[in-house]
């Protein structure tokens, strides 16, 4: 008869697992910002994408994916509903037709103008809840940087 996996190991993972703690925190924050953006029919992920597109030159999908820590397929799935809403446009790169560039439309810029004050208010409230939000941000950025460095080295 097979013995069940020890429950104390489950408790150990629950207490120690950095991935689990990061996922739980990310989900809590995501729900909080989803609620903030709900009146605009926008999710926190969509807001982040629209913000990432607010630059002088339209980025390629390949440039956006690592910035948002997404694979291209997931990013494409995030782009499509925003494109259907007319908030962004996807077009072939003028110099390399294989690459697709993504840019905000006038409607996308207008939505960002409405969303940004909501983000500011919610983010300020969140920062007030943490005694050292800057340190938390720096630690999270270290995780991203080290992971991206490892992935680039493995290629």
Image (cartoon, rainbow, N blue to C red):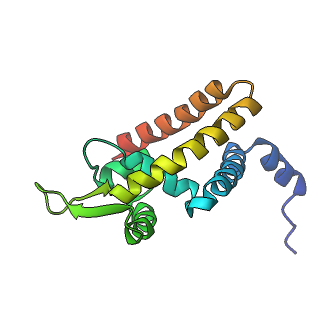
Residue at point 40% right, 56% down?
Answer: 108
Relative to 149, say whether 34 is above or below.
below
Give the side of residue 53 with respect to residue 130, left or right: left
Residue at point 36% right, 40% down?
Answer: 153
Identity of the residue furthest to the left in this view: 95
Q: Position of residue 104 (x, y in %)?
A: 34, 54
Q: Position of residue 8 (x, y in %)?
A: 89, 51
Is residue 69 in sight in this rendering? no
Q: Position of residue 92 (x, y in %)?
A: 19, 62
Residue at point 21% right, 59% down?
Answer: 99
Is residue 87 in sight in this rendering? yes
Quadrant of the snapshot with the N terminus: bottom right
Give the side of residue 137 with respect to residue 1, left or right: left
Q: Nearer the viewer, residue 1 or 120?
A: 120
Q: Position of residue 45 (x, y in %)?
A: 53, 55
Q: Nearer the viewer, residue 113 or 135?
A: 113
């Amino acid at each position: 008869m097979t013995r069940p996996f020890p429950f104390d190991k489950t408790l150990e993972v629950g207490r120690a697992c950095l991935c689990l703690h990061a996922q739980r925190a990310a989900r809590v924050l995501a729900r909080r910002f989803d609620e903030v953006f709900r009146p605009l029919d926008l999710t926190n992920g969509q807001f982040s994408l629209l913000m990432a597109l607010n630059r002088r030159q339209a980025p390629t999908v390949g440039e956006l994916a690592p910035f948002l820590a997404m694979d291209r397929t997931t990013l494409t799935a995030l782009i499509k509903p925003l494109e259907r809403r007319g908030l962004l446009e996807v077009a072939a790169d003028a110099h390399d037709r294989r690459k697709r560039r993504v840019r905000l439309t006038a409607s996308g810029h207008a939505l960002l103008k409405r969303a940004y004050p909501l983000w500011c208010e919610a983010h300020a409230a969140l920062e007030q809840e943490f005694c050292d939000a800057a340190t938390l941000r720096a630690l999270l950025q270290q995780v991203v940087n080290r992971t991206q460095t490892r992935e680039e080295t493995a290629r």
